[in-house]
Image (cartoon, coloured by chain):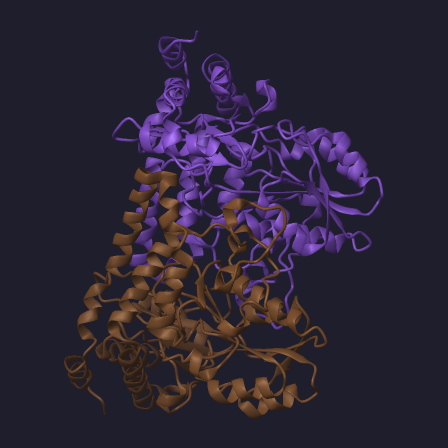
Chain colours: A purple, B brown
Amino acid sequence: MTSREDAAALDAADPLAPLRARFELDEGDRIYVDGNSLGRLPLTARERIAQLVDEWAERLVTAWPDWIEAPSRVGDLLAGACLGAPPGTVLVADSTTVNLYKLAAAALAARPARRVLVTDAGEFPTDRYVLQGLGDVRLLESDPVHGPDATDVVAACAPGDVALVCLSLVSYRSGALADAHAITRAAQDGGAFMLWDLSHAAGAVEVELEAVGAELAVGCTYKYLNGGPGAPAFLYVRRDLQDELRSPIQGWFGQRDQFAMGAGYEPEDGIARFGAGTPPMLGLAAVEAAVELVGEAGIARIRAKAAALTDLAVALGDERLAPLGFELGSPRKAVLRGAHVSFRHRDAWRICQALIARANVVPDFRGPDSIRFGLPPLYTRFVDVWDAVDRTATLVAAGEHHDFPAELARVT
Amino acid sequence: MTSREDAAALDAADPLAPLRARFELDEGDRIYVDGNSLGRLPLTARERIAQLVDEWAERLVTAWPDWIEAPSRVGDLLAGACLGAPPGTVLVADSTTVNLYKLAAAALAARPARRVLVTDAGEFPTDRYVLQGLGDVRLLESDPVHGPDATDVVAACAPGDVALVCLSLVSYRSGALADAHAITRAAQDGGAFMLWDLSHAAGAVEVELEAVGAELAVGCTYKYLNGGPGAPAFLYVRRDLQDELRSPIQGWFGQRDQFAMGAGYEPEDGIARFGAGTPPMLGLAAVEAAVELVGEAGIARIRAKAAALTDLAVALGDERLAPLGFELGSPRKAVLRGAHVSFRHRDAWRICQALIARANVVPDFRGPDSIRFGLPPLYTRFVDVWDAVDRTATLVAAGEHHDFPAELARVT
């Protein structure tokens, strides 16, 4: 059996261990394994928010010449830190939902003879809903643990009517990491654009947008990037396509020579044309600080630690949880996973509630039967993984979850 | 001639004067008359942002059950404080640009036989651009000082092909206040929806959305509402239309029973269906505090003071600026104005630059020839108006603006 001392030894050898002190941590003994939903607060993000508030108070409108560059400046920072993308291809603006809408609509407009959008039946809800609003959606029925496969995409594109394939690089439910190269090639061979949703991948695994060659990507910044609740999201458009594609939302922040306020909309060159309204500066200030920390850690080290943390969770799951009726809901091989692990159990919902209420462990639940343990490498210790599994096993062995209602209620 | 003592006497009698101390003010002698572009920082907004950062650090994802209500909670607050709208009709989310896109697209979809969108040639750029992206735009050529008139709207709607009329209640350039009742009736008689852009009106004048009966409205919160740079904007949908209209951006924050994450998009009842992605909590925290201050002051008192401040600016303009070649670019009657006054001058751009660089006055410039003095009633003193005009007159009389380039450069 793996002991807590074994986990502590892994922490002692962890090159990223010092970065944990760069976050605001819990006073008590809470084990937070839900950073895949909302990442912790970096100390520098608190500072940068306060600094932005000072700028607002002191400089007022005269600060805009500096602020106005933030969406592309933070985009470039993010591109280099963990997206494998060149400068001038990433913009931080709006929500993931709105960015997905903009890029999917742009792709459809660029493929006027094609009306079909392909995604997965298990894709994150907002992605499915946005696509349903834009055209005819064809759903893949992928393996629920391993996610979509290139052969699924080849088959879906075979009729020749697909404008866009939209998939998550890391599945929100199982944590499965898709084969970006093979799937992108399958979509492109089928005549479609490839759009990756990187929400559960950015800051967790190495994303190689330029090498992969995908046309489009979007993602959120409040999970593994630690940008704060509802922080502005990002979008990526491959450079050679930027001047061909147009956002359906023709806002003044995508307009050429914006402050000339000309009569007609004429989109700016480059990635800036995918902007819309005035940038949310408080949110951008936090994201900038948070992404700097990812850059400092290095995405290769983050990815290596994610593999080690999730390996430990899988091993402990086999030892302690499987005997209690849990089943692994994530791929077994680290190379096929992001930075979270799912365990499936028919009482998942009440176990999740019991863990929060009785054991001071905060995981999250995803229907119908998954408990996710999110293990962001910047601040998660190996002993946290051990404690989370230990408390879960102890609680379930004692039957404490039976004190909680089985019915589903709203959860975030 | 009006003396500084006359202005000081008005301050002494001003019931809103104590509210100035609720904002962070300038250390030196800067006269800030650009709150129509970016409002000052309320002390409570700084507190509320810090509190939200604490909640992020301490409660992490467990705070979401409280946070998730913020878009409608702050919307209700705003509706009651200064929009004359009932609860359940206003949502604070996204940018003004994105909200305008959502509502204009919804209106077009609800009038499938009509393709034309009407706005003014002098309308704020992002509004014109967004509409150009959605359908055929018919432009009014309204009086540049007084703005659109109901007869303009009647004529534009006469062909029977207009789906939507979109106009600013207060013009961003001249400050003219449109006749909301007459124009709304003209649009509706023409079979079109009426959408008011309240960006320069909310927190400056009494808006009576329910009494006016307009179908739709949007607006920004960082001007007279003091929500901070790039703060989330608002949208209004008349209650009886909410279940008929649909946002084109089908996001999970508009989905019924959101966390059931069902297969198909089914819009939530009521105003919530016009949400899209995860709410920007830092921005919402600031807006909530800022709108509370507007509610505390009372929009009727704010509006009365706006009239008095702009009356003083007009009178001083006649006395001190007209002899120097300035022309009033705003309506003369206070009842026809919002809370800013424009002065036109052929050297407006260099005067504006000189005021900032030499006279420590911060107005703003709007092409081709307007200097705007924004006079937000919550923190602007009558002596500020006097000082702003006095410094302008002194600077121009001395010809100091000739030291600055005449060419237009980017300004915010």
Q: Is residue A154 left or right of residue A256?
A: right
Instruction: Look at the picture and state if B319 lies above or below A347.
Output: below
Give the x, y percent position of residue B396: 35, 79
Q: Residue at x 51, y 36 (%)?
A: A366
For the residue pair A64 and A16, the one nearer the viewer reads as A16
Pick whichever, B117 or A67, lies toward us: B117
Query: Which residue is located at x 46 percent, y 59 percent?
Result: B93
Report the front residue among B191 and A235: B191
Location of the N terminus of chain A (image quadrant): top left
Q: Quadrant of residue B349?
A: bottom left
Outermost residue toward the top in this view: A1
Is A394 left, or right, of B13 in this rendering?
right
Residue B318 visible in the shown view: yes
Residue in the picture at 33% in, 57% down: B286
Q: Quadrant of residue B28?
A: bottom left
Where is residue A88 shown, x and y percent of the image?
Answer: 59, 44
Q: Is residue A286 above or below residue B325?
A: above
The residue nearer to you, when weighing A222 against B35, is: A222
User: Where's residue B382, x and y in %?
Assistant: 23, 79
Numbered-mark total:
0
Q: Quadrant of the C terminus of chain A?
A: top left
Point out residue B128 in the picture as x, y percentages from the top left corner: 59, 72
Camera sees residue B402? no
